[in-house]
Image: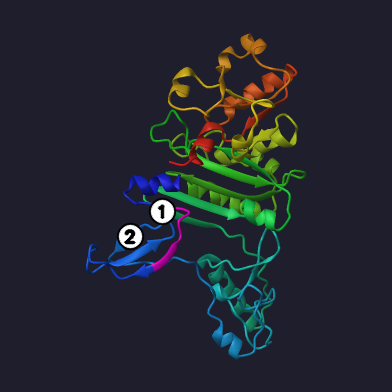
C-alpha cells in the first residue's frame, strides 16, 4: 500500500538495489549533479541527497561520565530512569527501554515516551518515587493521503524473541458503508495462539487509522485479549464507525480462530502451495474475479458453493479466499461441515494483492 501511494504521487522506488557510491558526473551527465550509483549499475543524477539510514544515540557525554551503556548503544537505566551513577538520571532517545511485549531491551525513539520519562525522572529527582514501566512503540505517520500506524510487536520482533503468535488480516470500512465517504482500513492484529493475549497491531488507510490504533494501544497496555476486543463498547454513529467497529471485528475474527471454527492460511504461503496437495478456491462474484485473481485458483461463487460441492476434491486441502476474508470464512465453514479440509486465507485477495510486485 505504501509503495503504491508513493508511486501514485510520482515517487520512483528502487528496491533491493542498494547504493554503492556517490560519484561526480561524467561528461554526458548533468554538470552540477551528484551521481548516485546503485549496485545494479544504474546511475541516478541528484541535485541533493538525503540519507535516511536510521539513528543511534549520541552517548559520548554519558560514556565520558562512566555511565553504563547497553548492548544496543543506549544509556542503561532502571525503572526509575536512574543511570548506573545514582546521582544521574537519563531520559529520551538516548536510553534503552524495555519492550512492552517482549520484555527485551530496545531503542524506541518516540516523543510521547520521552515526555513521560521527563516527568517521571523529575518526580524521582525530587523524592517522589515514580516508575517507568515499558515502551509499546505506538507510532503513526502520514504518507500523502495514506496513514500508517502501529503498536506493540510485529512478526519480526516476535520471532526474534521466540514468542508464538497468530496473525489475522482484515479490511473493514472506516465507518458504516452506507454512509458516504467510508474508506477501507487494512488492519493486522497479532495475538497469542493459546490465551488470545494481544501482542501487536498495524493499520493502513485513508481514514480512521489513528482511532483504531489508539484503542488497540490502550488494550495492549491493559493486557487485554482478543476476547476483550470483541466486547469493547466503542462510540458508534454512521459517520464515525460501524455497529461492529473494526476493533470489535478483529477480536471476533481472532475468536473464530481460537475456538477452532476456522483455520487460517497466510498470504506468504500461497506461492509455495503445491497443486497436487492444495486447491485455491475463489468464492467472489464473477465481476470481482474479472478484475484480478490469484493464479491457479478455481472459481465457485459463494452463492453457488452448496450446489457445486461435488466439483471439489476431497483428497486435497482447500484454501478459500474472497475479497477481504468474510465470505471465504463462510465458505470455509460450509466446506468444513461437509467434511473438507479447508483453511481461510486471512485478508484474502486484498492482502495477497498488496504484497505482489507492482
On the image, which quarter does residue 156 sit in? bottom right
Q: Is residue 149 left or right of residue 339?
A: left
What is the quadrant of the C terminus in the image? top left
Residue 38 magenta? no
Q: Is residue 249 visible?
A: no
Q: Secondary structure at mark 1?
A: loop
Which residue does the image show at 73% across and 24% down from the upper left? 341
Residue 119 picture location, percent across and down: 57, 74
- Mark 1 surroundings within 10 Å by alpha-carbon count, few (fewer than 14), some (14 through 19), many (20 or more): few
Residue, disc 1: 14
- Circles 1 and 2: CB atoms closer than 8 Å: yes
Q: Is residue 192 above or below residue 292?
A: below
Is 131 situated left or right of 294 in this image?
Answer: right
Q: Residue at x 56, y 67 (%)?
A: 113
Q: Earlier in the sequence, mark 1 or mark 2?
A: 1
Which span of residues is magenta-colored? Answer: 15-21
Image point (65%, 70%), residue name: 132
- The quarter holding residue 158 reads bottom right
Identify the residue shown where x is 60% and y is 35%.
270
Residue behind mark 2: 44
- Mark pair 1, 2: CA separation: 10 Å
**Which residue of the protein is positioned furthest toward the front in this rendering?**
27
Amino acid at each position: 500500500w505504501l509503495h503504491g501511494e508513493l508511486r501514485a504521487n510520482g515517487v520512483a522506488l528502487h528496491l533491493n538495489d542498494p547504493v554503492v557510491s556517490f560519484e561526480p558526473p561524467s561528461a554526458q551527465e548533468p554538470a552540477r549533479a551528484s551521481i548516485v550509483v546503485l549496485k545494479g549499475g544504474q546511475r541516478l543524477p541528484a541535485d541533493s541527497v538525503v540519507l535516511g539510514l536510521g539513528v543511534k544515540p549520541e552517548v559520548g557525554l554519558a560514556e565520558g561520565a562512566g555511565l553504563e551503556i547497553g548492548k544496543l548503544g543506549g544509556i542503561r537505566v532502571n525503572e526509575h530512569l536512574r543511570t548506573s551513577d545514582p546521582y544521574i538520571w537519563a531520559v529520551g532517545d538516548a536510553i534503552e527501554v524495555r519492550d512492552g511485549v517482549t520484555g527485551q531491551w530496545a531503542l524506541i525513539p518516540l516523543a510521547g515516551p520521552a515526555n513521560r520519562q521527563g516527568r517521571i525522572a523529575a518526580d524521582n529527582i525530587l523524592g517522589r518515587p515514580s516508575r517507568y514501566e515499558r515502551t509499546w512503540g505506538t507510532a503513526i505517520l502520514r504518507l500523502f493521503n495514506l496513514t500508517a500506524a502501529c503498536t506493540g510487536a510485529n512478526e519480526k520482533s516476535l520471532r526474534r524473541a521466540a514468542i508464538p503468535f497468530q496473525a489475522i488480516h482484515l479490511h473493514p470500512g472506516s465507518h458504516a458503508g452506507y454512509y458516504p465517504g467510508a474508506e477501507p482500513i487494512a488492519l493486522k492484529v497479532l495475538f497469542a495462539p493459546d490465551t488470545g493475549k494481544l501482542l501487536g497491531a498495524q493499520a493502513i488507510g485513508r481514514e480512521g487509522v489513528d482511532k483504531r490504533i489508539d484503542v488497540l494501544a490502550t488494550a495492549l497496555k491493559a493486557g487485554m485479549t482478543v476476547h476483550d476486543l470483541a466486547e469493547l463498547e466503542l462510540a458508534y454513529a454512521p459517520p464515525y464507525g460501524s455497529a461492529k467497529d473494526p476493533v470489535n471485528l478483529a477480536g471476533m475474527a481472532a475468536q473464530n480462530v481460537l475456538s477452532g471454527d476456522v483455520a487460517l492460511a497466510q498470504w506468504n504461503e500461497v506461492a509455495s502451495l503445491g497443486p497436487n496437495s492444495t486447491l485455491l478456491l475463489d468464492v467472489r462474484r464473477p465481476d470481482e474475479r474479472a478484475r484480478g485473481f490469484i493464479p491457479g485458483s478455481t472459481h465457485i461463487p459463494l452463492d453457488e458453493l452448496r450446489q457445486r460441492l461435488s466439483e471439489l476434491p476431497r483428497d486435497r486441502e482447500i484454501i478459500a479466499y474472497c475479497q477481504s476474508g468474510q465470505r471465504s470464512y463462510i465458505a470455509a465453514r460450509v466446506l468444513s461441515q461437509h467434511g473438507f479440509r479447508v483453511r481461510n486465507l486471512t485478508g484474502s485477495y486484498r492482502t495477497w494483492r498488496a504484497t505482489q510486485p507492482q
